[in-house]
Image (cartoon, grey):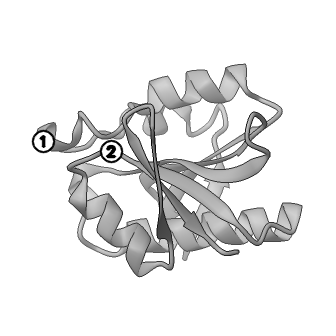
Amino acid sequence: MFQIRPVTRENLDEVLALSVHESQRAFVSTTAESLAEAYVYSDTAFPFAVYDDETIVGFIMMGYYEAKNYYTLWKLLIDKKYQGKGYGRRALEQGLAFLKERFNVSTVYTGVAPGNAVAKSLYLSMGFVETGLFENNMEELRMGE
């Protein structure tokens, strides 16, 4: 069964071992960097391991961006061994469902680095739209109102 589960002591080493292809490293934070951010922003960051049955295939982190008062897809990483199998889409669906169920969220934002065509294509296919804002070298996308 495909699902997202909290990052715990039991799965931490496997989450930390996740990696992307060399060509993608400029676009994606490592899971160690992401978990450090989740620790610092523990009240507003929601990190999850992405599972296919009992195999960890990726990492997703949702969050609340206090400065702008909105919820975000903060991080999404599918391990290089498992890319191209639809896991990113399924992880994003479950991450969005988490925000909706837990916080009754109808609008979610994300950012995509220029040149990260794969991520941008995924986000647009899921219903995100460009807002026209570029900030911190990221193009902002929004899903919902």
Mark 1 = which residue? 23
Which quarter of the figure has residue 104?
bottom right
What is the x, y in percent for residue 130? Answer: 45, 65
Front-lying residue, 7 or 74? 74
SS for dot 2? loop
CA distance for labels 2 and 1: 13 Å
Image point (29%, 40%), residue name: 27
SS for dot 1? helix
Q: Could you tell me if residue 55 is visible in this image?
A: yes
Query: Where 105 sits versus 78, above or below?
Result: below
What is the x, y in percent for residue 4? Answer: 60, 61
Between marks 2 and 1 in the image, the one whose residue lies nearer the viewer:
2
Front-lying residue, 67 or 33? 67
What is the x, y in percent for residue 73? Answer: 58, 53
Amino acid at pointer 2: Ala
Query: Where 16 sits versus 114, above or below?
Result: above
96 with respect to 115 (left or right): right
